[in-house]
Every structure is written in C-alpha cells, then in structure tokens.
Image (cartoon, grey):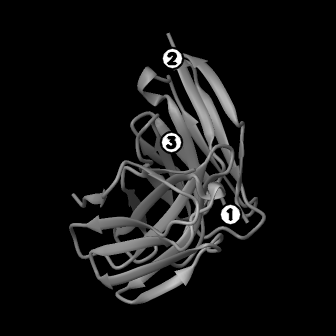
Amino acid sequence: QQPVQSPQAVILREGEDAVINCSSSKALYSVHWYRQKHGEAPVFLMILLKGGEQKGHEKISASFNEKKQQSSLYLTASQLSYSGTYFCGTGGGNKLTFGTGTQLKVEL
Amino acid sequence: DVKVTQSSRYLVKRTGEKVFLECVQDMDHENMFWYRQDPGLGLRLIYFSYDVKMKEKGDIPEGYSVSREKKERFSLILESASTNQTSMYLCAIRKLLGTVSNYGYTFGSGTRLTVV
C-alpha cells in the first residue's frame, strides 16, 4: 500500500519554509525522499534509517518517527530551485513503494 | 557516477502492438526496477530484477513482462499494448551507499509511451 503524502500541493514565496509529511499504514524500516523537477527524472535526496534520525541535504532536512510510522521533510528558506514534486518512498528488502507526491512551487 | 539510459524518450504505439522498453546501466548493479508514473498516482512498481534472469512482480504487473539476459540490461515488455498503458515509464537501479539497508535509487530519464 502506498504511503500517504500531505499536502498534495503547496505554493511558497522564496524564503518561506514548508513541511511535507509522509505516513504509512505499515511499519517503516526506512524512508527515502526524492525530488523530481518538471520533465526530469526523480533525484535521490536522502534516506532515513533510524527512528528520530534527522538528515540534511542543502537546507532540506527530514525526520523519521518509527512509532508514528511517518516521516517529514523540512524545506527551510526555500529557493526557486526547490520547485518540483517530492516523493517519499518506503519499504524493506529490495523494493520501494512511493507516495503520490507533493507538488511544490516556489515563487519570487 | 552510474548512468541509467532508457533508449527512447518518446514512443507512440498502436493498440495491440508488442512494445519493448529498454534500460541499460553502465555499472554492475544487481537490482533494477521498472516503475510507471501517472498524475495523481505517483510511481508504481511494475517489475524488478535482482540478478540476471531473476525477476519479481511489483504492485501492477498485469499486462507486462520483463527480460534480463545480461546484468546491464533490463527490458520491459508490453505484450499487447492498450490505451490504459499510456504513461511515463521509469527505470531505476539500486545503488548501495553503505550497508545493504543504506541505498538510493538512480532513475533513467524516462520513456513517455502513448498508445493510440
């Protein structure tokens, strides 16, 4: 079953912050985050392996709460280059199941 | 860095045709995947392979098959294309970042298939 992402879409002004959430009905062993810019392939941002662990990529960080079976992606002081669709991916073993995506648009 | 190449960027096929989508990687990664991407549905796994001649069904395998005769090449086959298979198809490889549970996917640039 696909993880659920929220919000589905968000529009920001440059410099604003945003949070994207990813929830699963199944126990989570790891959570991936990817960003896909328009017309391009998804690009790996980070993987979170331990509960409560926060990781960062540029001014983007994420947390992973195993007990709540959810992860959140934090975008701080957003830039125009952050625009795109963000996907979380969950799973164990060999394969990932991706959420339906969150469209993020950063405007001047 | 690993390169994942999908042979066609755009493809138009007729209903009932047999369609082959090719994916080639330039390193020795064992795990390869085929996803389809549709608006509002995200990326859904069709099939994956963890070694030559080894394959497993994903979440939506109906109407598809795969072939992996060589490690670097993973093909997706639409046995008899239908209009509901019009989609963006993405190939990916799994790249280890450390331990076996620490990995990321590298995607190809995708093939946009239209079935008419």
Are tags 3 and 1 found on a single chain? yes
Are tags 1 and 2 found on a single chain? yes
At label 1, the amino acid type is: Glu
Give the numbered dot on residue A15.
2
Please determine whether, in this image, residue B44 is positioned above or below residue B9. below
From the viewer's side, name the closer residue of B83 and B49. Answer: B83
Give the numbered dot on residue A66.
1
Q: Position of residue B58 (x, y in %)?
A: 60, 74
The N terminus of chain B: image quadrant: bottom left
Q: Position of residue A11 (x, y in %)?
A: 63, 21
Residue position marked by numbered label 3 in the rendering: A61
Q: Tag 1, which secondary structure?
A: loop
Q: Position of residue A27 (x, y in %)?
A: 71, 70
Give the numbered dot on residue A22.
none
Mark earlier in primary sequence (2, 3): 2
Chain ID of residue with mark 1: A
How far, Cα to Cα, is label 3 from label 1? Answer: 17 Å
Q: Tag 2, which secondary structure?
A: loop
- Assess whether mark 1 and mark 3 are in contact (beta carbons under 8 angstroms): no
Please determine whether, in this image, residue A78 is positioned above or below residue B57. above
